[in-house]
Image (tube, grey):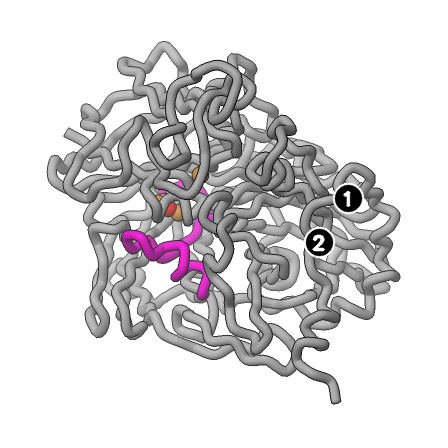
Amino acid sequence: MVTRRRLLKNFTKISAGGLFLNHSLDRYAFGQILDQFQSELSIPPPDAGSASNGRRNFYLRLQRGSTQFLPNAATSTFGINGDYLGPTLRFRRGEEVSLNVENRLGESSSLHWHGFHLPPTEDGGPHQSIAEGQSWNARFEVIQLAGTYWYHSHVLHQSGRQVYKGLAGMILVDDESAPMLPQEYGVDDIPLIIQDRRFDESGGLQYRTLYQDDVMGMMGDTILVNGTYRPYFRPSTSLVRFRVLNASNARSYNLAFSDNRSFYQIATDGGLLAAPVALTSLVLAPAERAEILVAFDPSDAVTLMSIGQQPAFPEFPGGISQMMRSLNTETFQLLALRASSSLTDNAEIPAALSTVFRLPEAAATNTRRFTLQMGAGMRSGEDRGPGTGARNGTGGGYGGGNYFINGRVMDMDFINERIQLNTTEIWEVRNNSPMMHPFHIHNGQFQVLDRNGRAPQANELGWKDTVQVRSGELVRLIMRFTDYIDESNPYMYHCHILEHEDRGMMGQFVLV
Ligand code: C2O
Ligand code: CU
Ligand code: CU
């Protein structure tokens, strides 16, 4: 008799630590894993709402569900209008949307529209918590550029657990004036919601069961794409647009193809780049999105992978150093791709995509400084030179305590920053800790000015709402604050490693 333990052992898992230096792509030829990637990639159902009185109305119900991710095991999950994850919402630029969110989870929750420029009362953050059995209505005008956004739970201290259980989904903003790109949803325009999970022996989701889950954030050893375990997708067109959303709590992915082929990034978090950027790999941190175009030949067989990254933290004796050095160093498969033997010639890679207006640094009238810190307090903060808790001169400590921004943990009753309406500001975000933090600002999109004084790469010159701030880095952002003055309702900014956010690495700002 095959025991459940035996079954679970046979699953491909990400192996922890170790072999990161010699990962050769050839070892992951498609043929070797073809028999393992047996489930067709599920595509979240599109939901364009229903239009009435010039408004587009959506009904979203937060509910409990049961999902079969693994063979022979059911997992209890959360979903939005379904068992796990939610529908892909389709908004049109310029229209008003109304989102009715009904909470049937049995616990408080919220839904946040990540990346949107909207009034703070409609944002769905910790201040718009919805009690069990209650409904909340959000209404706002879609003034975003066309692009790939998302929505997820954002209830105080529980976002990590609720997103992990499934409270997330994608939002696509469409705009008729966008250039010709593959746009047939589920055919040549494919959402890829990438998440890592850890299962127990009976198929249940494990959450924050290890010390490192609290320190580095919750990392799983099993990958799901759109909730599908070991998925494959069959391209039927010569060009496919993948809208990649890293909806993991803490893991970053270094996307690449098993044959090292080039692909073209066409959009960042907040819309199209000026022109496609050719890449062979792309690191996507939690909450970041990238739209990529990939060309296929008939019968192509290739795998979308995540390639191990070099450890970013210097080596010291002791477990914490080992833990930090093992972060995101694993190589593993995400999605098997096998193209049809005859492909529809659907689109070409355009030479130009849009005009990205770069915010001039000279327009900024104020600079704010934010320092991201980890630790129990005693080791956080200033650089105290070499030694315990001040590794490599980057200062800062780490450990099982709270996480801070500028020495404070998130406090619902404390407004950290007051920002003058209709101004442009520079935010200097400094990471004094031993690991990367994806820094996210609510209420719209910013641009990256530089990292440690160096100009951003070509694919970071577009609009962003979440930016990687690596250990020891100082990243300067520029953002315009417009439209929604409200002295009493704040927006959030935070690390998008959800366990860091839940444990305090978050602050609030109001527009005055
Ligand atoms: Cu994606 Cu404050 O959130
Ligand atoms: Cu957000
Ligand atoms: Cu963080």
Residue 307 image point, x, y percent: 72, 43
Task: Say whether marks 1 and 2 touch (CB < 8 Å).
Answer: yes
Residue pictured at 41% horizontal, 34% vertical: 374
Residue pictured at 24% horizontal, 36% vertical: 508
Q: Which residue is mark 1?
A: 19
List the single residue furthest toward the left. 488
Queried whether the magenta region covers residue 147, the answer comes back as yes
Q: Tell me the amino acid under the disc marked 2.
A: Ser
The answer to which of 229 and 242 lies nearer the viewer is 229
Query: Where the N terminus falls, by quadrant?
Result: bottom right
Queried whether the magenta region covers residue 178, the answer comes back as no
Residue 24 image point, x, y percent: 84, 43
State the CA–CA distance, disc 1 to disc 2: 9 Å
Give the structural element (helix, strand or loop) at label 1: loop
Write down the region rendered in magenta: 144-165
- Identify whether 204 is placed above or below 494: below
Query: Where the C terminus falls, by quadrant?
Result: top left
Residue 15 marker:
2
Q: Within the image, what quadrant is residue 21 found in? A: top right
